[in-house]
Image (cartoon, rainbow, N blue to C red):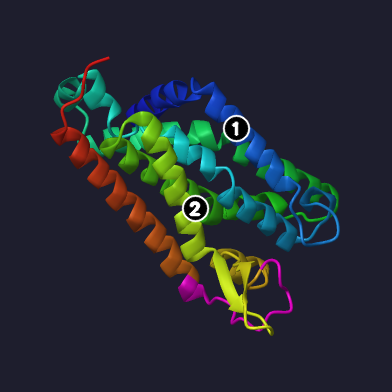
Amino acid sequence: MRFLALARTHFRLAARQRALWIVSLGLALLSITITVNPGLSFETDNPAALALTAQMLALMPPIAYAAAFTDLASESERLGISEIEASAPVPPFELVAARVAGALAAMALPSVGVLLFCAGGQMLHGNVWALLQAAVLLAGVVLPAALVAAALSAFAGSLLPRALARIAAIVAWFGVLFLGVFVPTPTAGGGLRVHIAADPVAQVLFGSTPLLDSPESAVTAATPLDAIALLALKLAAAVVLLAAAGAIARKRTYRRR
């Protein structure tokens, strides 16, 4: 209960960033419109269409998260309340976890709503497992990407002024996409064409093709081990970035606002 109370407090604080929250909502709504199947994901009972929407939610709204969480690790140091937090009868890990969970819940709420809306549409079209599938996609695809984007933002915010940190975090998120999501393949004319790789979780559990925009591709499909390894890598990267951001923030001297 103490963790939930702390998380609710940070949820309310993050929800005050209305401009960034609105951008997150806009990107989440835009994610619904992207499809490679007949009809939108809420107009069909195809789980692969729901998985595609989840993958778009893992690519686009995190742009807003990268701009929204620059104060995640450094806010208490900037405000001069870190010593008060340290004296509280709460383990430091629980404080950090509640801060991350509450803030991320506020920004990711539009994505959760969009995914549940699409799942509801699929249930009306006969997919009785749509809500369970949406929960799996949320936990395995959407939230891990959101956590990585938030961690990148927190790390940039611990190093740079807020405005510059937001730009740097967004650029870093696009760098992550180019390294792990966009796949260049050679063309017959000797050039390169960039494709979008499907998330291994979506491939393993929902039958997504390895390349979202090229179903006929001969690219090898991901295995369950690939899916587990990628999830573990995302979690480890986020934890390392958040830990580094916290360590850097504690050693910096901030001008009190």
Mark 1 element type? helix
Q: Nearer the viewer, residue 251 or 42?
A: 251
**Where is the C terminus found, in terms of image quarters?**
top left
Residue of label 1: 23
Residue 174 badge: 2
Q: Position of residue 36 (x, y in %)?
A: 77, 62
Q: Is residue 115 above or below residue 205?
A: above
Residue nearer the viewer, 59 or 160: 160
Q: Can the viewer see residue 8 in this picture? A: yes
Q: Left or right: where does residue 104 sit relative to residue 255? A: right
| Label 2 packing within 10 angstroms: few (<14), some (14-19), many (20+) | many
Magenta span dominant secondary structure: loop
Against 5, residue 152 (above or below) is: below
Q: Quadrant of the N terminus?
A: top left
Going by the numbered disc 1, the residue's amino acid type is: Val
User: Which of label 2 and label 1 is nearer to you?
Assistant: 2
Residue 216, located in which quarter of the rendered image? bottom right
Task: Give the x, y percent position of residue 231.
Answer: 44, 61
Over which residues does the magenta segment extend? 212-226
Indicate which disc, 2 or 1, sits on the residue closer to the N terminus: 1
Q: Are marks 2 and 1 in contact (CB under 8 Å)?
A: no
